[in-house]
Image: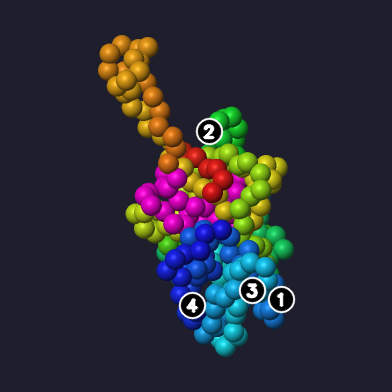
Amino acid sequence: MILNPNAPNSYVVKKGDTLWGIARKFLNTPWHWPEIWDKNQRIANPHELYPGDILTLDYASGGKLQPRIRVDRKGYGEPIATLVSFMVWPKVLDEATIKNAPYILASRDDHHLIAEGETVYVKNLRNAPVGARYGIFHPDKALHDPRTGQLLGYEVTYGGYGRIERVEATSTATVLEAHREIRKGDRLLAPVNEVANLKGVIHAPTTKVRADIVTLFDAEYISGNYMIAVINKGQRDHIEVGHTLGVYTPGRYVVDEVETCKRKSGAVCSQLPPEKVANLVIYKVTDRVSYGLVMDASREVRDGDEIGNP
């Protein structure tokens, strides 16, 4: 744990804050924030901070100074959450889930591209209440483990979402939002409420982690911050929600000017060590893959970058 030498004595939580961003103000290694959390205070869940709450960095009494964070509850409204907006729609689905999902048969006017406000007809819709909202997606490329070649699932692209109006053999829905193209054959998926996972503690893994980024989504900045990355490790590899991992770019190959390459003159013969370029906070874990949010990126994060301990 490394304290930020420029850490403020106190901080007032603002609307739009994230737990990671606040921890960064106090620590150079923000995933260590649970280690300075005051376990005896009345606010048991640090994820339930509200705009207006005051955080103070102070030190516990005892044989040595031990930093802790004290919270004065003064805020109200919606609590802050680092990852909540990323936890509704999965980005990788298995073949069975896609095959069994309801799909758009046609629109009322039989348009090739379906726009907001249009009525669509849906097949294979089961046990859906009228008024329920469903994401509309279509499968894109197959994703394979870059090391083993094993099929991990299929990357999906969300075009928008619709509201169920009538449930029958051929059901009816209305497209409420269309962010991308929506076509015949696109599938529907109910949202997944996994906000409860936010109560998990952001922490570094205690075992060795080695993985690869297999795909990236939703780049917000060129630096890579707030990209969603999918890695080729999951529950069976002991990845947990809240794990903070490091993102590393493979070291480039260079010509060693001192040791003679065993290849012909001018050959590239030595590889530099991997370079850490970002942190990755895991927010969803399945059997084979996990989803993470890229934080603290010092350069763009790419498909194929390696994942290790922070």
Q: Earlier in the sequence, mark 4 or mark 1?
A: 4
Residue displayed at 53% across by 33% down: 146
Neighbours of disc 2 within 10 Å: few (<14), some (14-19), many (20+): some
Q: Earlier in the sequence, mark 2 or mark 1?
A: 1
Q: Which mark is residue 60?
A: 3
SS at badge 2: loop
Give the percent coordinates (x, y) of residue 173.
56, 67
Mark 4–mark 1 contact, CB under 8 Å? no
**Is 54 included in the stretch rendered in magenta?**
no
Q: CA distance from mark 1 to mark 3?
A: 11 Å
Give the percent coordinates (x, y) of residue 225.
42, 57
Neighbours of disc 1 within 10 Å: few (<14), some (14-19), many (20+): few
Residue type indicated by callout 2: Pro
Q: Which residue is mark 2?
A: 146
Q: Nearer the viewer, mark 2 or mark 1?
A: 1
Decide if residue 24 is in sight here. no
Report whether 128 appears left or right of 306.
Answer: right
Q: Nearer the viewer, mark 4 or mark 2?
A: 4
- Pick whichever, 292 or 19, lies toward us: 19
- Residue interval drawn in magenta: 276-303
Neighbours of disc 4 within 10 Å: few (<14), some (14-19), many (20+): few
Decide if residue 43 is in sight here. yes
Residue type indicated by callout 3: Ala
Residue type indicated by callout 1: Asn
Q: Earlier in the sequence, mark 4 or mark 2?
A: 4
Q: Nearer the viewer, mark 2 or mark 3?
A: 3
Q: CA distance from mark 4 to mark 1?
A: 20 Å
Q: Which residue is mark 1?
A: 40
Q: Earlier in the sequence, mark 2 or mark 3?
A: 3
- Residue lying furthest left in this view? 266
